[in-house]
């Protein structure tokens, strides 16, 4: 099978939620680098990655697909159309590069551009209020942010809520834009955790 046909079959499998086909098109020991996950090292993990991705993004489809083949590698530039956490439709440009050997993808790298952000009225109001605020000291800001994330990591929802203004807005270019304390905490709790290990706070820049 020509290399480009393998990648074309992968795009079709993704668009039609054919998870077993996705797995079958990758070599058992495939290495997959993605902007959305840790590095994966087998075809089952790649299948599970796509299963979770397509669960979180309704109607996720590769469109405007352009493929360039060079030897055993194919680079696909495409636009992903989907609905995010907040059910708003969005588009995201991606570059999906695959290296094929013996009709199987042995190495794959998925690069993504940040989706366009459109702020609604609550988000705009929160942004304007933040820009108008004269601000406190960097030290107090770091202390507040560090305390918030330490509580989030510890799953202390009520304590974390005490650090948030009632009109708080969270702008996430991947999972959506939400306003209000409960909505922000719900979105943070719904954000996928690492596939292994645990989240930890390493630095706060203010």
Image (cartoon, rainbow, N blue to C red):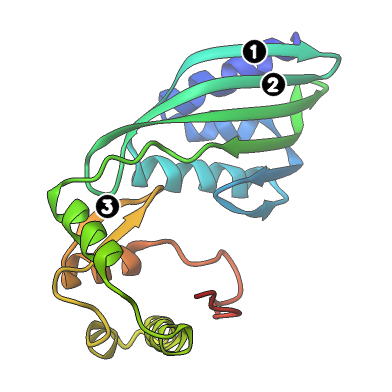
Q: Secondary structure at mark 1?
A: strand
Disc 3 packing (10 Å; few <14; some 14–19; many ≥20) = many
Left or right of residue 86: residue 105: right
Q: Secondary structure at mark 2?
A: strand
Question: For the point 32% across and 88% down, which residue is it?
Answer: 156
- In contact (CB < 8 Å): disc 1 and disc 2: yes
Q: Nearer the viewer, residue 137 or 27?
A: 137
Horizontal and vertical percent position of residue 201: 55, 80
- Residue 8 drawn at (x, y percent): 60, 15
Q: Quadrant of the N terminus?
A: top right
Residue 192 occupies quadrant: bottom left
Determine which residue is flagged by label 1: 67
Give the residue at mark 2. Answer: 75
The tag earlier along the polypeptide, 3 or 2, is 2
- The residue located at (28%, 49%) in the rendering is 85
Q: CA distance from mark 3 to mark 2?
A: 31 Å
**Residue 127 falls in which quadrant of the image?**
bottom left
């Amino acid at each position: 099978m020509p290399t480009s046909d393998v990648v074309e079959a992968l795009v079709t499998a993704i668009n039609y939620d054919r998870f077993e086909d996705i797995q079958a098109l990758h070599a058992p020991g495939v290495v997959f680098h993605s902007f959305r996950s840790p590095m994966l090292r087998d075809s089952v993990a790649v299948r599970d990655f796509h299963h979770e991705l397509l669960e979180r993004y309704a109607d996720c489809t590769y469109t405007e697909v352009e493929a360039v083949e060079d030897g055993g590698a194919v680079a696909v530039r495409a636009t992903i159309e989907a609905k995010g956490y907040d059910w708003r439709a969005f588009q995201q440009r991606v570059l999906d590069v695959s290296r094929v050997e013996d009709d199987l993808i042995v190495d794959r790298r998925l690069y993504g551009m940040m989706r366009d952000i459109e702020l609604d009225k609550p988000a705009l109001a929160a942004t304007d209020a933040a820009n108008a605020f004269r601000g406190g000291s960097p030290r107090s800001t770091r202390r507040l942010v560090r305390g918030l994330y330490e509580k989030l990591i510890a799953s202390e929802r009520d304590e974390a809520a005490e650090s948030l203004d009632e009109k708080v807005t969270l702008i996430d270019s991947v999972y959506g834009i939400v306003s209000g304390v409960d909505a922000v905490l719900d979105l943070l709790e719904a954000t996928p955790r690492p596939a292994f290990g645990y989240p930890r706070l390493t630095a706060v820049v203010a």
